[in-house]
Amino acid sequence: MASKLPQVAYFCMEYALDSTFKIYSGGLGILAGDYFKGVKDHGFPMVGIGIRWKQGYGEQHVDPATGKVFDAYRTGDHGFLEDTGVTVKVEIKGRPVHIKVWKVASFGVDSLYLLDTDLEANDGEARWITGQLYGWFGEERVAQEMVLGIGGVRALQALKIKPDVYHFNEGHALFAGFELIRRRMARGATFQDALARTREEVVFTTHTPIVQGNESHPIERFMYLGANLGLTRAQLKQLGGSPFNMTVGALRMSRIANAVAELHRVTANGMWKGVKGRCEIIGITNAIHHGTWVDPKMLDLAAKGRKDALWTRHMENKRKLIDFVEARNGVKLDPDALLIGFSRRAAPYKRSNFIFTDRSFIEPLLRSGKVQIVFSGKAHPLDDNGKVIVEDILEMTRLYPGRVVFLENYDMEIGALLTRGSDVWLNNPRRPKEASGTSGMKAAQNGVLNLSILDGWWPEACDHGRNGWQFGDGFESPRDAVLDKHDFKAFRKVLAEEVLPTYYQDRPRWVDMMVRSIQDTREAFGVKRMLDEYYARMYKRS
Ligand SMILES: *Cc1c(COP(=O)(O)O)cnc(C)c1O
């Protein structure tokens, strides 16, 4: 029997489609954006629901006078959005909030709908609900999520789209489930029946292995805003506990959930093992959209095994990065010296300044010009610790001028340049806190060799010394100081004894590794494999 694929409605707070369209923050948006480009390329039956963020995510710059990091918001020009003519309403804090539905049919997607409250019909506070992505944590955040979830389900109905499956990418979309339950109860179902039926059509993806990264809210906040949609305090508590944890609620409202890599599956199942009545969490590893991130010439030359031409092409990509750095920062990097790239959100577990752990090791390599490092990354606008991490890196750029560079305001453009033009892609999170990571996949498929802790996706791809390198051997410790010390020792050994000698003394072997890196990752971490897997394992009913 030829089975028809189910129609899916995918909900996500952010989508990274293009560096000029700032309705994304980081990895979650990159994944969702690549997902929808894959949906269009390969013709999958799926629509996306997101938000048209008026100002998007904050830009982040460095004040040249003080060396301090500051945020700036800019209102986007979204004239390219198509007007669907549809508006829906959601009651928030006792008054109706009007939501306009836009369609995106550019940047390689054609089935993505964005919700917008910045309308004349709304009061000033309501107009700002879709103002800034992740701008707030409390009441305002719940209002945003009500627009996404409740507004999203109502928008689908108004657009006459009838999904077989609702996919919540992260817990932000959970109120969509409340709306599905409310509709059933309005037709006479009991809460338990409505919940059971809703569970049959909802699936969920969890992303963060950091407990604090999993949003929670006091139940009273839901009651006050009307996010409960008629559910009682006891029913809410039954779903998400008290305070209400969005991930727990989603795990209890879904028929199946997934983590975003194999190791993350193990971590997530351990993390939520005390949650009674939750669904199973399987592993589906993230992937990337080739057209967005991968130089097609590198793919082609690797497939043909044309090693000299592949190296020449890599040097062109490296030159583009070096020119960009010069134009932005006025620093001239050396095309013949090993260039290490690193760009991450500035969060403690990602250890952005790890490479400077023991300065007596890295300093001679920097001073002699054997190693140069290009950093990029942003801190969350409300995260002062993250800003201190960025300021630490800035301090290193002053200590090692011409050798250590920081590119401010990390975005898709910088992400693409760095993962094409670096020689080595460094990734040093505290295992097992990196759920997947997609920047390393971009690097690998461009022949940029990963030098990484065995975390996220890397244990699935790493063939040490053949397509990249691992360090740390998968060691874990609940004590950060112990883990950091262990990992740094492992890192310096691999850099000194394997990476540097190969780069400077065995170029043919280096190029062999580049070819293997591309060959080993292009299918396995390409968006087609990921979408096939979501349809086969998450969306299809058994
Ligand atoms: C690829 C990318 C990410 C996600 O990369 P991680 O490996 O998860 O850190 C985040 N932001 C930008 C701009 C990217 O290009």
Image (cartoon, rainbow, N blue to C red):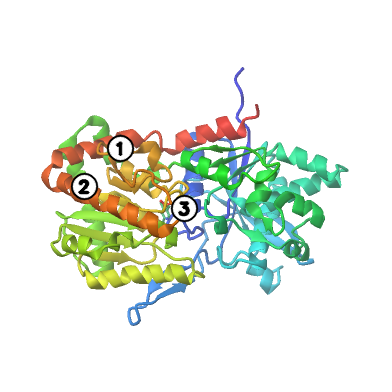
Viewer-proximal residue among 432 and 44: 432
Q: Is residue 297 above or below residue 362?
A: above
Q: CA distance from mark 3 to mark 1?
A: 21 Å
- In the picture of the structure, the residue carrying the numbered disc 3 is 27
Q: Is residue 485 left or right of residue 274?
A: left
For badge 1, the amino acid type reads Ile
The response on whether ligand 1 sits within 8 Å of label 1 is no
Q: CA distance from mark 2 to mark 1?
A: 18 Å
What is the residue that sits farthest to the right in this orientation? 188
| Label 1, residues with CA under 10 Å away: few <14, some 14-19, many ≥20 | many
> Measuring 38% from the left and 42% from the top, which residue is drawn there?
458
Residue 370: where, in percent of width, then height? 15, 57
Q: Earlier in the sequence, mark 2 or mark 1?
A: 2
Residue 368: where, in percent of width, then height? 13, 62
Q: Which mark is residue 499?
A: 2
Of tags 2 and 1, the one toward the viewer is: 2
Residue 446: where, in percent of width, then height? 30, 43
Q: CA distance from mark 2 to mark 3?
A: 27 Å
Q: Secondary structure at mark 2?
A: helix
Q: Earlier in the sequence, mark 2 or mark 3?
A: 3
Q: Is residue 347 left or right of residue 46?
A: left
- In the picture of the structure, the residue carrying the numbered disc 1 is 518
The response on whether ligand 1 sits within 8 Å of label 2 is no
Of tags 2 and 3, the one toward the viewer is: 2
